Image: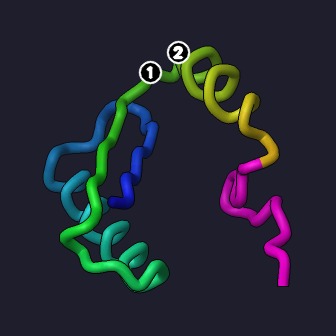
Amino acid sequence: MPFIQMYVRPGRDEETKARAAEALVDAASKAWGAPREAFTVLFEEVSAEEWDAQVTAAIIEPKRDKVLIERGKRVTQVAE
């Protein structure tokens, strides 16, 4: 059961989050070949003041070797 969790800055309304979740599920379902019903999506809001501590230092840096895209650009090469 794929689980998509995104850390985002506060400020988006629920309708915007719902549209983003639908788009994520559509893309992931197509890419993974899994049914939409298999996916769960969660948005976790983190303030700008807490971003570095709660996201960058706590989540991204410890898993740096697993980061595929950073700031919109691919950083890890996919083995062919």
Q: Are marks 1 and 2 in contact (CB under 8 Å)?
A: yes
Q: Is residue 28 left or right of residue 38?
A: right
Which color scheme did the rendering employ for the protein?
rainbow
Nearer to the camera, 52 or 28: 28
Q: Residues within 10 Å of mark 2 (few under 14, many from 20)?
A: few
Based on the displayed image, in which of its 4 quarters is residue 26 positioned? bottom left
Residue at image coords 40%, 53%: 4
Q: Main secondary structure of the magenta part?
A: loop
Q: Is residue 35 left or right of residue 64?
A: left
| 58 to 20, vertically: above or below | above
Residue topped by disc 2:
50
Query: What amino acid does circle 1 point to?
Result: Ser
Residue at image coords 35%, 79%: 34
Queried whether the magenta region covers residue 45, the answer comes back as no
Residue 9 is situated, as x and y percent measured from the top left of the image, at 42, 33
Residue topped by disc 1:
47
Nearer to the camera, 52 or 29: 29
| 30 to 19, vertically: above or below | below
